[in-house]
Image (cartoon, grey):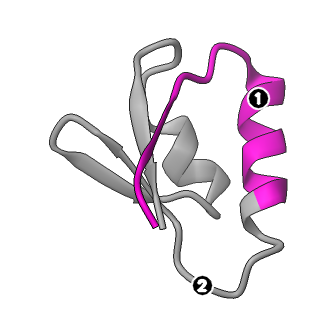
Amino acid sequence: MKAVDIALHHQENISELVNITNQYPFTILLRQGRYLVDAKSVLGVCSLQRGVPMQLEP
């Protein structure tokens, strides 16, 4: 699979992304610059800057 560019602007977008990614049994990562976090973690996703483009990587 390939990476997809996304931007999360609101808190609702973050919780929706985490809910969607938790439905899959494999690891999904979110990369923003040099930072890489687990896309299934609310705290991890919240630690990234909102509104800045990031890549969703399976």
User: In the picture shown, does residue 33 fall above or below 19?
Assistant: above
| Residue 36 image-quadrant placement | bottom left
What is the span of residues highlighted in magenta in the rendered image?
Answer: 1-20
In the rendered image, the residue lying farthest to the left is 34
**Of callouts 1 and 2, which one flags the residue occurring earlier in the amino acid sequence?**
1
Task: Quickly name the residue at label 2.
Answer: 26
Residue 28 image point, x, y percent:
53, 67
Image point 41% across, 58% down: which residue? 2
User: In the picture shown, does residue 22 fall above or below 39?
Assistant: below
User: In the picture shown, does residue 11 fall above or below 47?
Assistant: above
Say what secondary structure mark 1 lies in: helix
- Judged left or right of residue 14, residue 33 is left
Which amino acid lies under the numbered mark 2 shown in the image of this protein? Phe
Task: Quickly name the residue at label 1.
Answer: 13
Residue 30 image point, x, y percent:
44, 50
Disc 1 residue crowd, few under 14, some 14–19, many 20+, Cα 10 Å: few
Image point 61% across, 23% down: which residue? 8
Q: How many numbered marks have been drawn onto this rendered protein structure? A: 2
Give the camera-side residue of 3 and 20. 3
Image point 60% across, 84% down: which residue? 26
Which amino acid lies under the numbered mark 1 shown in the image of this protein? Asn
